[in-house]
């Protein structure tokens, strides 16, 4: 959804700054923690054909979310039948329990052999945003294969993940794999509009489940976002911004335009929203994740960036000003203020009794909704303006990304194994919201990462036109999850590592 796109914006933003963070960590202790019994992630020609055909079939089912109350329930029901038909082993394995939640969401519980290991969860969503045919090279729900790509809505957001997770599990089960660590797979059906994930979350909480970590959609491996950075760059989002939709309203006495009062509802409100637009929320660079990340990895940068970033006590204000200058990177260091709606007036010659405006704030992880609302009232500083909070979500807590963070280190280890050419992995912020926000009751470790390369062109296609995934990239995504599930069977705690200087 939009979250996906804005997560990537955040990554791109870091890249725009010319900042590259190389981390050569051995993650969970490197090779010596590879289990001897690990099943190789090699797939036969027949399996590879079957996996791409399965994805094509999934794209063909138009599971569109049009709006909060408008979802294609026929397609969602068909999708439920479809996954049963293409992943028969998943559905008939005794230690895999399947439940339908909220009519169209799916929860799989994969029982591991070692109850002492804390379970984790993989998330994805099966609904997609609408895709009118116009502008597409091939019809968006055709799932056609062309020039090595599978085309269609949902190939990147997010049926690729739904299918790849189940596909990886199917292939593991066919190889008689039994996991040691239990895990859940939660496939939401209304991520693009609200969040049926709430029901799954409540159910698991009622069952007393606590998760070691969650992996959801979000960030990618970025490639080609800045011309002078040749190396691909993986960022795992460890937090996401909050959001507030705030309505401002001014009521005045209606009157005739032939004898207008000194101030009208429109004038008062326009002045108020203008003050908000002209007064940015405070720059949180000093207390934000971005600063921590840059400091942690400063020594990996070439001269002179390494010196600047190693000395943020001195250069912090300079770096912070550079970041503010670009409207995309600006969103990484503060709560943003976007004036999105303005309604007033009924007739050309009537002074309107009421004027309303809606402002969309994206709340920096270093602030709370309440703090932002206080600031807004102080900036407006006019008691004729009423405030109505239409909706508000606090930013998500920052998940750990240190050497002891199991989920983060498992992702890093699997990136190193599946994408050996990627030696840049760093934590980042997601500017939007994902389904994972409904699961904070189950874990403090939520990571948003899609094991796929993304270039600027494919970035545009998410929620846009000509969304597509290469057959090879999809196979690699399956391989990633296939390895990740096995890597998660480790009972080793992540170990400290030494940077290779
Ligand atoms: Zn999505």
Image (tube, grey):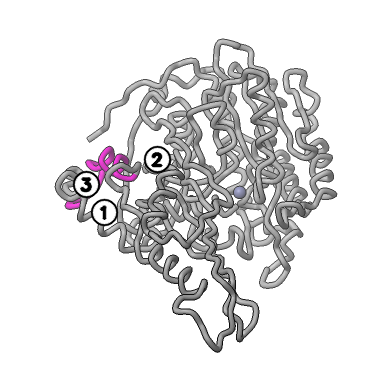
Mark 2 or mark 1, earlier in chain: 1
**360 part of magenta stretch:** no
**Under tag 1, what secondary structure?**
helix
Q: Nearer the viewer, residue 377 or 149?
A: 377
The quadrant of the picture occupied by the C terminus is: top left
Query: Element at badge 3?
Result: helix
The residue beneath circle 1 is 320
Image point (56%, 23%), residue name:
211
Whether tag 2 and tag 1 are in contact, CB under 8 A, the answer is no
Q: Earlier in the sequence, mark 1 or mark 3?
A: 3
From the image, tell me which residue sits under label 3. 309
412 over 74 or under it: above or below: above
Residue 76 in the image, given as x and y percentages of width and height = 79, 46
Residue at which label 2 appears: 427
361 vs 486, left or right, is: left
Q: Which residues are magenta?
A: 290-305
Image coordinates for residue 45, horizontal then vertical, percent: 69, 41
Identify the disc placed on residue 291: none
Q: Residue furthest left?
A: 314
Q: CA distance from mark 2 to mark 3?
A: 16 Å
Looking at the image, which residue is at 37% across and 58% down?
379
3D distance between C-alphas at marks 2 and 1: 18 Å
- Residue 322 position in % (x across, y down): 26, 59
Whether residue 257 is situated above or below residue 196 in the rendered picture: below
């Amino acid at each position: 959804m939009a979250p996906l796109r804005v997560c990537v914006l955040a990554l791109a933003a870091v890249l725009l700054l010319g900042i590259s963070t190389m981390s050569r960590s051995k993650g969970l202790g490197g090779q010596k923690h590879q289990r001897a019994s690990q099943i190789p992630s090699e797939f036969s020609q027949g399996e590879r054909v079957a996996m791409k055909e399965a994805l094509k079939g999934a794209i063909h089912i138009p599971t569109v979310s049009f709006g909060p109350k408008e979802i294609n329930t026929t397609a969602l029901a068909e999708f439920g039948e479809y996954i049963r038909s293409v992943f028969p082993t998943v559905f008939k394995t005794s230690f895999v329990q399947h439940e339908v939640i909220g009519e169209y969401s799916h929860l799989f519980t994969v029982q591991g052999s070692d109850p002492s290991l804390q379970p984790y969860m993989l998330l994805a969503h099966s609904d997609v945003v609408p895709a009118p045919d116009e502008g597409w090279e091939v019809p968006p729900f055709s799932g056609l294969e062309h020039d090595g790509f599978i085309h269609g809505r949902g190939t990147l957001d997010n049926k690729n993940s739904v299918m790849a997770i189940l596909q990886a599990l199917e292939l593991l089960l066919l190889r008689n794999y039994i996991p040691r660590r239990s895990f859940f797979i939660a496939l939401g059906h209304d991520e693009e509009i609200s969040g049926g994930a709430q029901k799954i979350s409540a159910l698991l909480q009622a069952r007393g489940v606590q998760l070691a970590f969650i992996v959801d959609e979000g960030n990618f491996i970025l490639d080609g976002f800045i011309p002078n950075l040749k190396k691909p760059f993986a960022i795992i989002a460890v937090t996401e911004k909050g959001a507030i939709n705030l309505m401002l309203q001014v009521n005045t006495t209606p009157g005739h335009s032939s004898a207008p009062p000194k101030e009208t509802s429109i004038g008062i409100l326009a002045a108020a929203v203008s003050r908000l637009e002209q007064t940015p929320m405070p720059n949180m660079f000093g207390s934000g994740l971005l600063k921590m990340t840059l400091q942690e990895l400063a020594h990996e940068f070439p001269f002179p960036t390494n010196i600047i970033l190693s000395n943020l006590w001195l250069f912090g204000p300079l770096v912070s000003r550079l970041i503010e200058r670009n409207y995309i990177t600006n969103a990484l260091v503060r709560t943003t203020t976007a004036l999105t709606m303005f309604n007033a007036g009924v007739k050309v010659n009537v002074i309107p009794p009421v004027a309303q405006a809606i402002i969309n704030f994206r709340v920096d992880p270093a602030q709370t909704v309440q703090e932002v609302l206080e600031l807004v009232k102080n900036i407006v500083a006019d008691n004729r303006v009423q405030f109505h909070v239409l909706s508000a979500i606090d930013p998500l807590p920052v998940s750990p990304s240190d050497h002891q963070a199991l989920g983060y280190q498992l992702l890093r280890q699997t990136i190193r194994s599946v994408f050996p050419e990627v030696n840049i992995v760093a934590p980042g912020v997601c500017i939007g919201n994902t389904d994972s926000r409904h699961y904070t009751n189950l874990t403090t470790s939520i990571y948003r990462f899609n094991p796929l390369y993304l270039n600027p062109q494919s970035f545009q296609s998410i929620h846009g036109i000509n969304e597509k995934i290469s057959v090879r990239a999809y196979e690699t995504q399956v391989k990633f999850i296939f390895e990740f599930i096995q890597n998660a069977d480790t009972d080793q705690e992540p170990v400290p590592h030494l940077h290779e200087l």
